[in-house]
Image (cartoon, grey):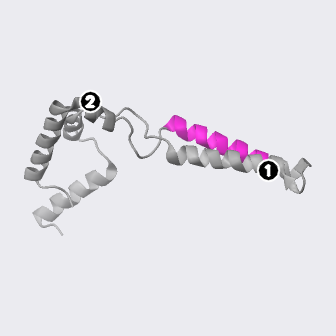
Amino acid sequence: MPLSEHEQRMLDEIESALYAEDPKFVSSVSKQRVGRPGARRQWQAALLFIVGLALLVGGLMVDVQIGELKILSLVGFFVMFAGGLLLVLSPRGGPASAGPAKRGSTKSAGKGSLSSRMEDRFNRRFDRGDH
């Protein structure tokens, strides 16, 4: 549920007071963002996954064993697993926002996620009574 204008103003005031009061804390908290990794990290993870898959399949064809264990296939599995972990656990791409002024300017410029724009359109229609 979106915040009302009054609640949004109060939140912005609290946020700007926090930036003014303790900028060191704000910078330490906002260093790492969670979400979708950047394009470079996605390519690295995909390449690692493909190399791991090639090792896994190649290990089944080549007779390199320690006991009954196909060691090359095992290494390939771990490389694939590392590629998946790299994709899932990587920090979000792009620099963290510089503060409330920067965040407000992007919002006023009309940029935002698709879901937030769709939600705004829905709320405008609902408020007009077009439902």
User: Residue 103: horizontal and vertical position, in percent?
Assistant: 23, 37
Dot 2 amino acid type: Lys
Relative vertical location of residue 49 with respect to residue 100 in this rendering, above or below:
below
Residue 19 image position (x, y, % from top left): 19, 33
Q: Which residue is drawn at the image coordinates 66% and 45% (left, top)?
A: 49
Q: What crowding class fits label 2: few (fewer than 14 Cα within 10 Å), some (14-19), or many (20 or more)?
A: few
Q: Which residue range is magenta in the image?
A: 39-57
Q: Is residue 13 above or below residue 123?
A: above
Of residues 21 and 106, which is closer to you in this image?
A: 21
Q: Residues within 10 Å of mark 1 (few under 14, many from 20)?
A: many
Mark 1 belongs to which amino acid?
Ser
Q: What residue would you read off at disc 1?
A: 73
**Mark 1 and mark 2: Cα distance apart in space:** 48 Å
Instruction: Tell me which residue sits at (23%, 30%) in the image.
Output: 23
The secondary structure type at the circle numbered 2 is helix
Q: What is the number of the mark on residue 24?
A: 2
